[in-house]
Amino acid sequence: MSRSPTASPLTVTWLLASAVALGCSEPTAQPHANLSVTVVSEPIPWSTASINGAPNWAGGFSLDVLLRNQSTVASAEYLQCGPALERESQPGTWTRDVEPMCALEGTNPIVVPPLGEVQLHSTISGGYPAMTVAPGRVRLLYRYFTTGVAGTADEARSAPFELK
């Protein structure tokens, strides 16, 4: 009759410690969508009136953009509130010029599937007294969520462009 092997107390302690450590480890993070923003048309001012021969951007403008989801596994949801407009106040320093108002209730998001893209005609309005659209170097900021992942919105920015 052979005797079955027994584990040493040191081995048992190591196995228990490993099991406890594995049970306490952080859960694997869920993948997130990864949107990129590409401006695909020149901005068109809303007003046809010019100021000293230059376009009148004060009322706002519209342009076409392409939202591309670079994630291979997660969908992005964009709430259609319109982008925020950031202005370069000093080289490399960006400030928010226009922030869209967004009612979350009743808004059907645009879903951008993994590796998918959506072209939008976006409008930017300086409709609030403290927020005006003016000539200068600007970029668009889009906020979006990853489908099925709770938390704060992710942000995607366009490359800077000029309002002349």
Image (cartoon, rainbow, N blue to C red):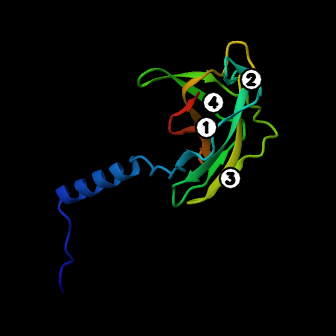
Decide: is 4 above or below 32.
below
**Which callout, 1 or 2, points to the residue nearer the camera?**
2
Mark 3 — residue? 111
Measure the alpha-carbon separation of dots 3 and 1.
13 Å
Q: Crowdedness of circle 4 by 10 Å Cα count: few (<14), some, many (20+)?
A: many
Three-letter residue code for mark 2 = Gly
Residue 35 visible somewhere in the drawing? yes
Nearer the observer: mark 2 or 3; the answer is 2
Which percent across, then down, holds residue 89?
A: 49, 18
Which numbered disc flags the more N-terminal residue, 2 or 3? 2
Secondary structure of residue under mark 1:
strand
Q: Does residue 147 appear in this view?
A: no
Residue 97 or residue 28, whichever sits in front:
97
Q: Along the line of sight, which residue is nearer the eye, 24 or 45?
A: 45
Cα separation between marks 1 and 2:
23 Å
Disc 4 and disc 2 in contact, CB within 8 angstroms = no
- Which type of secondary structure does the marked residue at label 2 adopt? loop
Label 2 Cα neighbours within 10 Å, binned few <14 / some 14-19 / many ≥20? some
The amino acid marked with disc number 4 is Ala
